Amino acid sequence: MNGLSERIRIVLVGTTHPGNIGSAARAMKVMGLGRLYLVAPEAPFPSSRATALATSGDDVLQEAVVVDTLLDAIEGCGLVLGTSARQRSLPLPLLDPRAAAARGVAEAPSHDVALVFGREKSGLNNEETRLCHYLVNIPTSEEYHSLNLAQAVQVLAYELHLALRADTPGEIEPPDWRPEPPERLEIYFERLAATLQAIGFLNPNQPKRLMQRLRRLYLRARPDENELNILNGILSATQSAARGRTERNGD
């Protein structure tokens, strides 16, 4: 792996068949990728079936990281790209594989990038999708659009390989910009929901739709540490003002 490829994680969520894990590892290996994360695989891992289908990618399997949740797998990542074959009721920005690879490689010098693949039959659920900054869709024919998990990994790995071979990225981010990782944003979203409820802006009986839209807004902006500190400071000041108003009304 070269330096940039080491910043790219391939994340497989809830994989049902060990053979798909092995085939995905092989697809990664031939395209120069080596960081594999497995989120709660259904079958026991390591697996002889996975090793058999990995061929020369068995070293990718040996170094694979197994975690319980997607949030664990993307910890520390500044960019999370989630693959999806279907549109959502509240869709995220959508990229094709080439655009996704170009963005991932352009940002890899600054922070880790995760490319997330869902379950073989059902893909990523809504809770997992909301952790992603962008969705990636692989265009297929209208007549038949079912891709095997390893095939999908191969398509994206190939596009990443091409992007890694390019001389320069198409977009260069500001040198002082380091987007905050998902685990810090999740803490912020919890504080935001609590604050909006405290000031009566968020209906506690129907919080999801508004919070989904706000989540999409912040994920699109992808604040860095200083920006998130400012946003948290605003929440703290808002909470303080709300408490003061409540105390005055109580008097």
Image (cartoon, grey):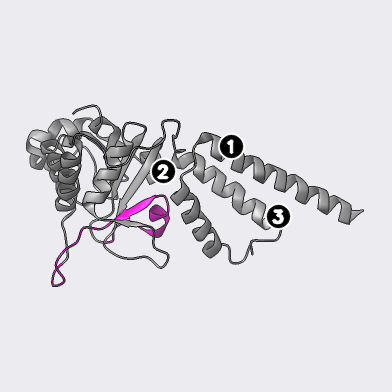
Rounded to the nearest angstrom, the CA distance separating label 1 from label 3 is 20 Å
Q: Give the residue displayed 58% in from the left and 62% down from the top.
A: 207
Q: In the image, which is nearer the foreground, mark 1 or mark 2? A: 1
Residue type indicated by callout 3: Ala
Q: Give the residue displayed 12% in from the left and 40% down from the top.
A: 26
Q: Are marks 1 and 2 in contact (CB under 8 Å)?
A: no
What residue is pinned by disc 3?
A: 198
Could you tell me which quadrant the N terminus lies in? top left
Residue type indicated by callout 1: Asn
Q: Determine the secondary structure under disc 3.
A: helix
Rounded to the nearest angstrom, the CA distance separating label 2 from label 3 is 27 Å
Q: In the image, which is nearer the foreground, mark 2 or mark 3? A: 3
Q: Is residue 123 left or right of residue 212?
A: left
Q: Nearer the viewer, residue 224 or 22?
A: 224
Residue 247 % position (x, y): 85, 50
Tell me if residue 37 can be seen.
no
What span is colored magenta in the figure? Answer: 122-144
Q: Determine the secondary structure under disc 1.
A: helix
Sequence order check, earlier mark of 1 and 2: 2
Q: Which mark is residue 229?
A: 1
Q: Give the residue displayed 44% in from the left and 35% down from the top.
A: 177
Tell me if residue 147 can be seen.
yes
Q: Which mark is residue 71?
A: 2
